[in-house]
Amino acid sequence: MTDAVPAAPLTDWLRSEVPEVKVGDGPVGVERISGGHSNLTYRITDDAGTSWALRRPPTGMVLATAHDMSREWRFISALAPTGVPVAPPVAYCADDTVIGAEFYLMGFVDGEVLGDAESGHRIAAEARSAAGLATIDVLAELHAVEPDEVGLGDLRRPGSYLERQLKVWHRQVHASAVEDLSVVDAAHERLVARAAGLPPSEVRIAHGDYRPGNLAYGPDGGVRAIFDWELATLGDPLADLGWLLASWGRPADTAPPTIAGPNQAGGYPDGDALVTRYAQRSGRDVGELDFYVAFARWRSACIGAGVYSRYVGGVMGTEESDGGAARLQSLQDQAAAALASLG
């Protein structure tokens, strides 16, 4: 899919607009970075051999309010001066005639991205506990940032973050290619009722997809950068914690994780230890966390419906030989787990 980032016009733009990228007579190197089912990430290699990272929207079936590159750019630019680790922002291009879509360029942060069960072995056994705790410490650090102090306060919206999220994702899942949404709808009804009874939350930067697959780790287990700000907004910080736990898992879980993660390898702290650490670091009450985990499972089902739709629509490749049947079953299973946990 390197045609989604045509090298020649990109090189011309870099030569004109981004002097820190060393451009020679030939085009820059463009390589798709594996992983991800939505916004696309590419490694750009300049004439000096330096790597950069480029983000652009998917190539088709884009929802009207999704895949906003300027929004991602704004979050990493706001957080770059803080202690929250992000890739250094370099340049943003709103001109969609350059490569066919808006995009932005950032520094390339090297590190282990732990996006599946097997990846857990890439961190040395003696560093795995530190990696798990660093995952939580960086999340608490992100949630400690006051949006107004970093210039993001105007993104604050009136009303309940959870009510907005439940409405938006419910609308989007009904625009998907999934035919049977009965379990998704039943879980949505219970989530709406529970959300109405929760106390008001703080408004903080919510990443929206915070998990090891969107982090870069160093060999000591430290987090070098948070990636993939596509779903970032101002909202309830506990939604990020619930999302992390739904993918990480807890000892008492009967449902599988939303996304297989690295902690299936030995040596990582379990989900309960992460909750305790977050409560200590953030000072937040985590007594309603089971709701947020259920919400995460339901939202995972809604996101999975969108990804399934793009596969069915033929814009995400053909690597799923079963036509997406396993993905369809997984999203139904997550919706069912959310419904069951809500009583």
Image (cartoon, helix red, strand yellow):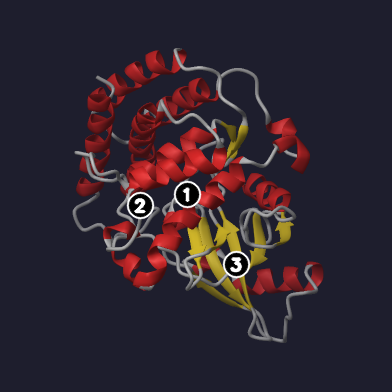
* Cα–Cα gap, marks 3 and 2: 26 Å
Q: Is disc 3 placed on a helix, strand or loop?
A: strand
Q: Amino acid at mark 2?
A: Gly
Residue 25, quarter of the rendered image: bottom right
The answer to whether one can see residue 237 in this image is: yes
* Cα–Cα gap, marks 3 and 1: 21 Å
Q: Which residue is mark 2?
A: 314
Q: Position of residue 299 (x, y in %)?
A: 39, 34
Callout 1 environment at 10 Å: few (<14), some (14 to 19), or many (20+)?
few
Name the residue located 48 percent from the left edge and 71 percent from the top edge: 220
Name the residue located 34 percent from the left edge and 65 percent from the top edge: 120
Circles 3 and 2 in contact, beta carbons < 8 Å = no
Q: Position of residue 315 (x, y in %)?
A: 40, 53
Q: Position of residue 4 (x, y in %)?
A: 53, 63
Residue 131, quarter of the rendered image: bottom left
Nearest to viewer (mark 3 / mark 2): 3
Name the residue located 34 percent from the left edge and 30 percent from the top edge: 294
Circles 3 and 1 in contact, beta carbons < 8 Å = no
Name the residue located 75 percent from the left edge and 55 percent from the top edge: 81
Q: Which residue is mark 1?
A: 60
Q: Position of residue 90 (x, y in %)?
A: 72, 63
Q: Amino acid at mark 1?
A: Gly
Callout 2 environment at 10 Å: few (<14), some (14 to 19), or many (20+)?
few
Q: Amino acid at mark 3?
A: Ala
Q: How many marks?
A: 3
Q: Which residue is mark 3?
A: 53
Q: Is disc 2 placed on a helix, strand or loop?
A: loop
Q: Is residue 201 above or below residue 282?
A: above
